[in-house]
């Protein structure tokens, strides 16, 4: 429910901002507005997730996101919504998700045996990808009715998610008892630095998402290149999730039992190639196929990275390590949107996507040399 709501809100905000400003740079600023609070709060949210009940943290965050969507709903209904207000709501949502993401991610290992973690990660990813298929499609469809309709449904979905997360029942997990200190705040960073496999996986995904941010420019491609409307934008936003859903279901049934590191790098390179194909396409079908391929290849990186992080991190550290993971991965989505918007503003949307795709391939080839232990990783079994 939370993912559905967030994806619907992203489509609505993106289309609304571009309709008001007709500026790719303005679209990039939405990503920056979400990135800044996530970046600033990273070390604090990890400490909080390890010290307090993770379900309660998620409940509070989802309730805040629901109220934020309600404000947008009222603003759209009464036509007093401004670009500044949308950016402010994006910042509030970014701050809430900064606390929510590591708290929710740290819950998973407490629910299943370690030997089943890769399967569970794949199924968890498929559930999120299903939400990312429904969310953009619903957001684009409802936006055709009116912006207030989208934001109203988003508010309800966030509030339902807040109630549902409190229904999760888990055994009492290990909690950090040490007081807040600089050492405790930075312990997640220190832990990752001691684990070159984790550092390599996180940083690889960071640069791949940062450079390959084609989805940030989908309103431009939908409006100016593919000549479609809000519903078409929703379909384009859903296409990567369709591919990712297919990939995650495949990995749930046929997990990576050997050569996981090689599969990771192959997936990132294929991700870059798919990004390039999307950038040069002028046909809706080809663009959808490229985006679906992009999603399918990206899910390999997601499953490998999440499995490695969860398997090699003790429970009392998962919140802090998860917060760094969110900074590397989650916020790279928003920073990637800003980078794509800036590049598109300077060179145009198509060159921006092509530069990103080529950059992703170059980074993957470079990381194979910088992190040989990651490439040599074979099994993800606990």
Image (tube, helix red, strand yellow):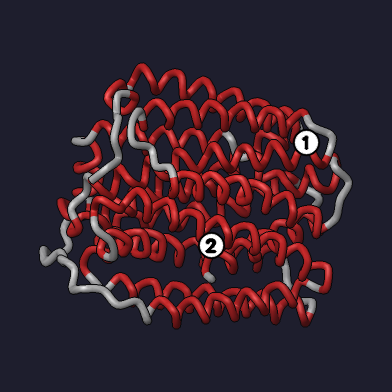
In this figure, which residue is indicated by the disc labeled 1?
Answer: 286
Left or right, residue 165 beside residue 196: right
Label whose residue precedes the other's in the sequence (2 or 1): 2
Quick one: label 1, few (<14), some, or many (20+) residues within 10 Å? some
Instruction: Provide residue 172's location: percent of width, then percent of height.
Output: 18, 73
x, y percentage for residue 125? 47, 54
Q: Is residue 126 visible?
A: yes
Mark toward the viewer: 2 or 1: 1
Which residue is more in the foreground, 266 or 185?
266
The relative height of residue 255 versus residue 273 in the rendered view (above or below) is: below
Which residue is nearer to you in this view: 301 or 332? 301
Indicate the quadrant containing the N terminus: top left, top right, bottom left or bottom right: bottom right
Is disc 2 surrounded by few (<14), some (14 to 19) or many (20+) residues within 10 Å? Answer: many
Disc 2 to disc 1: CB gap under 8 Å: no
Of all residues, the one furthest to the front in this rendering is 253
Residue 164, horizontal then vertical, whole percent = 44, 79
Question: What residue is disc 2 on?
Answer: 91
| Number of numbered discs visible in the structure rendering | 2
**Residue sitting at the far left:** 178
């Amino acid at each position: 429910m939370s993912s559905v709501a967030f994806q619907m809100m992203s489509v609505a905000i993106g289309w609304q901002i571009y309709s008001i400003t007709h500026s790719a740079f303005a679209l990039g600023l939405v990503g920056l507005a979400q990135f800044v609070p996530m970046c600033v709060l990273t070390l604090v949210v990890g400490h909080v997730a390890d010290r307090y009940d993770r379900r309660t943290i998620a409940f509070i965050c989802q309730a805040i996101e629901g109220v934020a969507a309600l404000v947008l709903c009222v603003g759209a209904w009464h036509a007093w919504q401004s670009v500044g207000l949308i950016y402010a709501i994006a910042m509030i949502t970014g701050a809430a998700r900064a606390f929510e993401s590591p708290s929710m991610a740290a819950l998973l290992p407490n629910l299943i045996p370690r030997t089943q973690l890769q399967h569970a990660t794949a199924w968890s990813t498929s559930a999120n990808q299903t939400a990312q298929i429904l969310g953009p499609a619903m957001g684009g469809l409802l936006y055709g009715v009116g912006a207030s309709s989208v934001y109203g449904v988003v508010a309800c979905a966030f509030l339902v998610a807040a109630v549902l997360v409190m229904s999760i029942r888990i055994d009492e997990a290990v909690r950090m008892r040490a007081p807040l200190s600089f050492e405790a705040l930075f312990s997640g960073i220190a832990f990752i630095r001691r684990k070159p496999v984790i550092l390599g996986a996180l940083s690889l995904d960071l640069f791949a998402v940062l450079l390959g941010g084609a989805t940030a420019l989908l309103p431009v491609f939908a409006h100016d290149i593919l000549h479609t409307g809000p519903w078409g934008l929703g379909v384009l936003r859903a296409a990567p999730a369709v591919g990712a859903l297919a990939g995650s279901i495949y990995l749930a049934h046929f997990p990576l039992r050997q050569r996981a590191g090689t599969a990771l790098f192959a997936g990132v390179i294929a991700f870059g190639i798919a990004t390039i194909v999307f950038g040069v396409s002028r046909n809706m079908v080809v663009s959808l196929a490229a985006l679906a391929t992009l999603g399918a290849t990206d899910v390999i990186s997601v499953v490998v990275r999440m499995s490695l992080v969860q398997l090699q991190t003790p429970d009392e550290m998962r919140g802090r390590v998860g917060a760094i993971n969110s900074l590397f991965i989650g916020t790279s989505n928003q920073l990637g949107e800003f980078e794509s918007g800036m590049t598109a503003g300077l060179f145009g949307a198509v060159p921006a996507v092509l530069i990103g795709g080529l950059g992703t391939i170059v980074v993957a080839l470079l990381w194979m040399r910088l992190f040989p232990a990651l490439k040599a990783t074979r099994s993800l079994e606990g």
